[in-house]
Amino acid sequence: MTHERHALMTSIKNEGPYLLEFVAHHRVLGFAQHHFASNDCTDGSDLLLDALAAHGVVTHTRNPVQPGQAPQPTGYARIRAAGHLDGADWIMVMDADEFLQVTIGQGLIQDLTRLAGPETDIVTIHSLAFGTTEDIRWHPGPVTHQFTRRLPGTHRRNAPVKSISRTNLFRSLHNHNPVGFTGGDRPVHVLLGSGERIEIAETGRLGRHLRQRRTDKTSHQIAFYNHYPIKSLESYCLRQQRGDGATPIGDVSGRYDHNYWQSFATAKIEDHSIIDRYGAALTAEMARLLALPGVSQAHAQAENLHRGLLDAML
């Protein structure tokens, strides 16, 4: 099934310095389409996405949000309404601080869905959470190369899962799982990151079964995603200021507090697997994207604006 088309969907705000690496990494993994929605950017993220979109690397949908609207689901709905997912066989929703790894075959998304086979509706994978370093400052450069300490595999922060789902079988998509199975009365067939296959009969409440699993069921056997939620202390402070994309505008989630930081900052296990598996190809793809007219300038502007936002917090 190598002819199947794989799409990635992402909703962002002020992720400018990280976007190029994020796009390049998932292009290396074989995603042919990457669809972004952006809202209220002040660091040039939207302009960088425009530059990439001008060359067909991504699509970019601006996502103006009003009080009471949550940016992420609103952005996903706008991408879908624009028809950007038409023609994609598989879709994955990821945040800009998440990087997929596939451990089978050549490490491509195609290897994962080939293993899934035609009988599978959803592939679910766990996170592998990474922490910080002693350096509190933000520095330009690939996140995957700067932050190499992770938590143990069965840590509670690795319980959340992300889903790769068949595009035409669900009414809508959330950050962790699809919603509204349209495949009839049969159960939903799921391939887990452990390689185990399960069936979910309660199709109206997929999130209850897919969003998070018990820590003793956490597995990184066939695929997982590296999660970099805190990076440096400077970066984390800016994330606190930016807010939570899953929370309606005007509400205060309080999610990104000291306890959230500390739970990831305790990561001590050195893990370079993503560099060993994809590092050379990532470097080459980033260089190729930077050589496209207008992209290097937009990327540099995003880094400069990002530094300005950090300095303004001091």
Image (cartoon, helix red, strand yellow):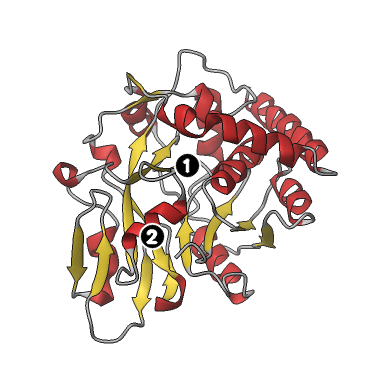
Assign a secondary structure to mark 1. Answer: strand
At label 1, counting other C-alpha atoms closer than 10 Å, the crowd grade (few under 14, some 14-19, many 20 or more) is: many
Say above or below: 141 vs 19: above
Q: In the picture provided, is 248 more to the left or to the right than 45?
A: left
Secondary structure type for disc 2: helix
x, y percentage for residue 125?
A: 32, 50
**Residue at image point 57% right, 63% down:** 75
**Residue position marked by numbered label 2 in the rendering:** 114
Give amino acid for label 1.
Phe
Instruction: Using the image as rendered, state which of residue 117 and residue 134 is in the foreground.
Output: 117
Say which amino acid is labelled 2. Answer: Arg
Q: CA distance from mark 1 to mark 2?
A: 20 Å
Check the picture and name the quadrant holding the N terminus.
bottom left
Write the residue at 54% across / 61% down.
7
For residue 176, say whether it is visible: no
Q: Looking at the image, which residue is at 57% across and 70% down?
A: 85
- Residue 33 image position (x, y, % from top left): 60, 59
Q: Position of residue 233 (x, y in %)?
A: 50, 23
Give 307 or 173, whichever is nearer the viewer. Answer: 173
Residue at the outermost bottom position: 184
Q: Quadrant of residue 190?
A: bottom left
Report which residue position mark 1 lands on.
99
Residue that protrudes farthest toward the top in the picture: 134
Q: Quadrant of residue 159?
A: top left
68 to the left or right of 286:
left
